[in-house]
Image: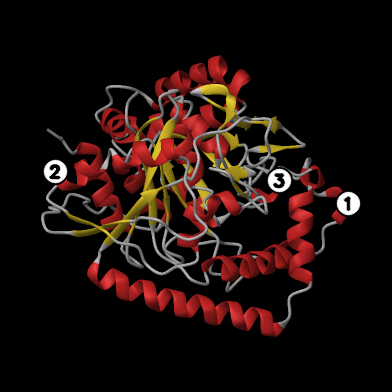
Amino acid sequence: MNSARELSRRLRTREVSAREVLEQHLDVSDRRNPELNAIVTFTRELARAQADAADRAAARGEFLGLLHGLPVAHKDLQETQGIRTTFGSPLFADYVPDFDTEIVRRMKAAGSVCVGKTNTPEFGAGSQTFNPVFGKTRNPYDLSKTCGGSSGGAAVALATGMIALADGSDTGGSLRNPASFCGVTGLRTTPGLVPIEPNRCPGSPLTVNGPMARDCGDVALLLAVLAGLDDVPSIARDFRGARVAWLGEVPGMPFESVVRDVANGARARFEALGCRVDEATPDFTGADAAFRVLRANEFFRLHHDKPLDRVKETVRQEIERGALLTAEDLAAAQAERSALIARVAVFQDTYEFFVLPTVQVPPFDIEQPYVTSINGTEMSSYIDWMRSCYYVSILGVPALSVPCGFTPEGLPVGLQIVGRAGADWDVLALGQAFEQAIVG
């Protein structure tokens, strides 16, 4: 499978046409999508028109932008002008917006070719991709397993070569979890780097938009577009002497042993890069309580006007929980978050990066809505099993999920690389170096 960067090079040297690249990707979709259900709304004729326009420009010696001729798909939470946008909800099954969100507009302006919309759980709630409108999206490595979520359709479409790049969003792990489960790469960006426009919940520190691709170089390409840059910053860097914390036990965050084993096997790759790797763990006290309050408040602000009897139970629960929050509750959560960020910032003064498995479990049965226990520890809610991601979300820092190996059953495992606030390009640089590291 060619990288997006290699496809871009070949398009710019006119070794291939945008129409040829598109048809190859659509052929893959025709073969794989019926069993996987990753792309839920196709825009084939629009895509062909965009590809032909790219080829006409190339014939004149012009190129449309950083994504010239590259097939992409947009998460079905992103509103797309003239293209159905359902949010995975029956309430919006027939909604066709008359505008593009800002990140869709930026990708279009950069010359991308839109093949359609990728599946997501209802309103993006939960890290298992299924909804009443389109049904379940399956894991390409094992059709009986989940692909994760909420950017699950995007991850599957990338893993199988249906598209070259994909946008996603992340509140408690929605870019990182499906990337881990599907063997691709997803970056939770520093809040504010990539716009959320229209922003229906201004001031929320949790939800971000970001890029997903098959490797870090391709993630960097899309991030440049999403962040409004004219060129792609270099992510080549020498990591000799860089301090990396290898996270140990975190209270309330159990991992399946198979996940820990695969992740621990990747430690040598950081050491091969010359990183100074220590076992060290920041104090995450308050992360759980603060995240739950701020998440419930965000859901209430976004969805309080929805009929509760027509949304899935977990969405209803978040809305109801948010409705009960007081100003004192919100102030306490913000204070707890501020104290947490300050503590972890001190930790990151010593350690430029910290690393842990992206997800606490391997991909699980697709018929199971969410994980209910880990190593004998019961999960009290539908998000407990995602603490490895949302404890990071609450910090407001960039976090990358990069593939690091497979379970004995052949299921992907991702490693999460977490950096300092605003250091998104450094996180991508370490991810790329990790991809290229040679051990032994």
Alpha carbon separation for disc pair 3 and 1: 14 Å
Reading the image, the residue beneath label 3 is 122
At x 78% / y 41%, what residue is drawn? 93
Number of residues whose C-alpha sits closer than 10 Å to that of mark 2, classed few (under 14), some (14–19) or many (20 or more): some
Of the pair 46 and 153, the residue shown nearer to us: 153
Image quarter for residue 149? top right
Pick the quarter of the image with the C terminus.
top left
Q: Is residue 22 above or below residue 275?
A: above
Q: Amino acid at mark 2?
A: Ala
Q: Amino acid at mark 3?
A: Glu
Name the secondary structure under disc 1: helix
Reading the image, the residue beneath label 2 is 272
Q: Is residue 203 above or below residue 249?
A: below
Of the pair 122 and 221, the residue shown nearer to us: 122
Name the secondary structure under disc 3: helix
Number of marks in the rendered image: 3
Of the pair 113 and 254, the residue shown nearer to us: 254
At x 53% / y 42%, what residue is drawn? 375
193 lies left or right of 35: left
At x 52% / y 68%, what residue is drawn? 287
Reading the image, the residue beneath label 1 is 309
Question: Is residue 309 in sight in this rendering?
Answer: yes
Where is residue 241 shown, x and y percent of the image? 12, 58
Where is residue 425 shown, x and y percent of the image? 29, 56
Alpha carbon separation for disc pair 2 and 3: 43 Å
